[in-house]
Amino acid sequence: MSDNRVQSRRQASIIVLNLLFAAVLIAGTLAPAAAMAGQKKHHAGGQANGKPARDRQGRVQTEIVGGHPVPQGVDTFMVYILIDAGKQKQQKQRKKKPVYIQCGGTLIDMTHVLTAAHCVAGNQKTPQKFHLAIGQANIRSFKPGAGRPVAEVVLHPAYNPVTFANDVAVLRLTEAVDDEGIEPITIVGPGQTEFDEAGKPASVVGWGQISEQGPAPAQLRAADLRIASDQACGKAYRSGFDARVMICASYRHRDSCYGDSGGPLIAREQVGTRTVTKHRKHQRNGKRHHRQMGRQTKQVPVYENLSQIGIVSWGRGCAERGSPGVYTRLSDPGINAFIMDALSR
């Protein structure tokens, strides 16, 4: 884990809100995907030369790379998390602007949200700093003051901010969610590893950057991945990868990124196929050049979301070849027991 580009994807995206709440700054760090404070799929460390860095400082940056938009009403368990990081003076401005750490999370029952420890570490004693948007696919108009408040932040007692082991935390809401259409996601049970096999389909969801140097969208996005073997992940990160409490997933040109930290890795099962028709225009050569419509059909798999098997934690860059994203393994008995205990508090 000596590579200083390996960072969390929390992208503790220190988000600086301007008058339109449009300026979102991301300071990369090696772990989860927070917004500007530095969260990425990998350990985010800080920002150097204007580029999000991924290191072991616990800040995270993560966004979905190579994914597709998720419409309103789908994946309603998704939670957008902003954490008040105080105020920061901006260049050429006299007044200081509010700064926020951005991460993702999931509603796992009507009063609890699951996220990454690196997203909340250092703020667990100040739940009033947390602002949550639940079941809201587009967060463009979201304002912290209108977010759902948090009553308690429970951090895994064995969380290691250097190695990102046990990178998990639970937020208890002040009130139960009763909005129509919002449903929590199920998490895997202890030792339930059938979804962890190499090659199994999975998906990652979040509001993180769409490329390592790209912007973070306001619209929720998802990307289809495949579970990577422990051997492949160990080869990529050597001693930095702990197969007991971590799981990897990747796919060519797809990944989580800065600002996605704390979001879910979801196991999926193929339930069938559907026919997709693609129309395209092409020009024929001849005495008269004219355009014709071409049509091509193909069969694509249809998947069904099952349950959450991981939490966006850390990685090296975004969608880099040979560098799968690393996620907290929820099937680990110790991590699973921590979550169940937090739900019963």
Image (spheres, grey):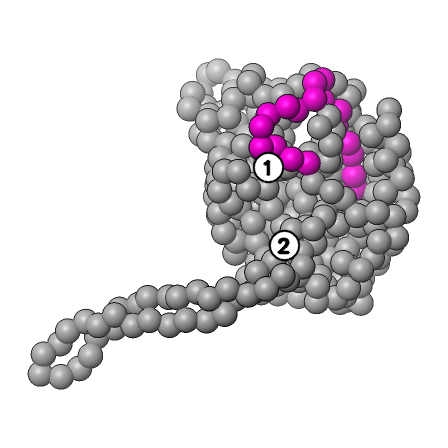
User: Residue 333 at x, y = what percent?
Assistant: 90, 47
Range of magenta residues: 167-184
**Residue 20, above or below 253:** above
Q: Nearer the viewer, residue 170 or 256?
A: 170
User: Residue 98 at x, y = what percent?
Assistant: 55, 20
Read off the residue under disc 1. Answer: 76
Q: Which amino acid type corresponds to the residue marked 1 in the rendered image?
A: Thr
Query: Image check: 21 left or right of 183?
Result: left
Tell me which residue sits at (87%, 48%) in the image. 190
Tell me which residue sits at (90%, 44%) in the image. 334
User: Residue 33 at x, y = what percent?
Assistant: 64, 41
Return the disc, 1 or 2, that comes first in the chain's sequence: 1
Q: Nearer the viewer, residue 42 or 93?
A: 42
Q: Nearer the viewer, residue 343 or 213?
A: 343
Query: Image check: 108 left or right of 154?
Result: left
SS class, disc 2 = strand
Tell me which residue sits at (55%, 42%) in the image. 74
SS class, disc 1 = loop
**Residue 237, above or below 64:** below
Looking at the figure, which quarter contains the C terminus?
top right
Image disc number at residue 137: none
Quadrant assignment, res 202:
bottom right
Looking at the figure, which quarter contains the N terminus?
bottom right
User: Residue 87 at x, y = what percent?
Assistant: 58, 19
